[in-house]
């Protein structure tokens, strides 16, 4: 039973790390898409 709890704990840790990474990646991507579109359409947006 202890081994099972350790396995679930490890899984939960990596699940949380993955979810935080996906969230941060989405935020960064959401920030940079308008910048890239601005550069494509006609130079840097101020």
Image: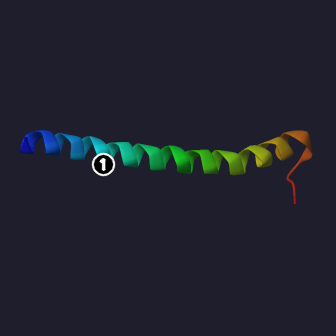
Quadrant in the rendering for residue 18:
top left
- In this view, the residue farthest toward the right is 42
* Residue at the extreme front of the image, as rendered: 1
Q: Nearer the viewer, residue 17 or 4?
A: 4
Q: Position of residue 32 (x, y in %)?
A: 71, 48
Left or right: 13 with respect to 22?
left
Q: Residue sitting at 30 percent across and 48 percent down?
A: 13
User: Residue 9 versus residue 44: which sits nearer the camera?
Assistant: 9
Element class at badge 1:
helix
- Image quarter (top left, top right, bottom left or bottom right) of the N terminus: top left
Q: Residue 27 appears at what percent x and percent y?
A: 62, 50
Quadrant (top left/top right/bottom left/bottom right) for the C terminus: bottom right
In this rendered view, identify the residue nearer to me: 1 or 28.
Answer: 1
Q: Residue at x 88, y 48 (%)?
A: 43
For the rendered model, the colour scheme is rainbow
- Residue most toward the bottom? 46
Q: Residue at x 74, y 43 (%)?
A: 33
Q: Identify residue for label 1.
A: 13
Picture coordinates of residue 45 (x, y %)? 87, 54
Depth check, front residue: 28 or 3? 3
Q: Classify residue 3 as left or right of residue 11.
A: left
Residue 2 lies, in percent from the top left, at 7, 45
């Amino acid at each position: 039973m202890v081994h099972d709890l350790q396995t679930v704990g490890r899984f939960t840790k990596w699940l949380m790390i993955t979810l935080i990474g996906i969230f941060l990646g989405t935020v960064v991507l959401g920030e940079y898409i308008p910048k890239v579109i601005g550069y494509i359409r006609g130079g840097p947006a101020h």
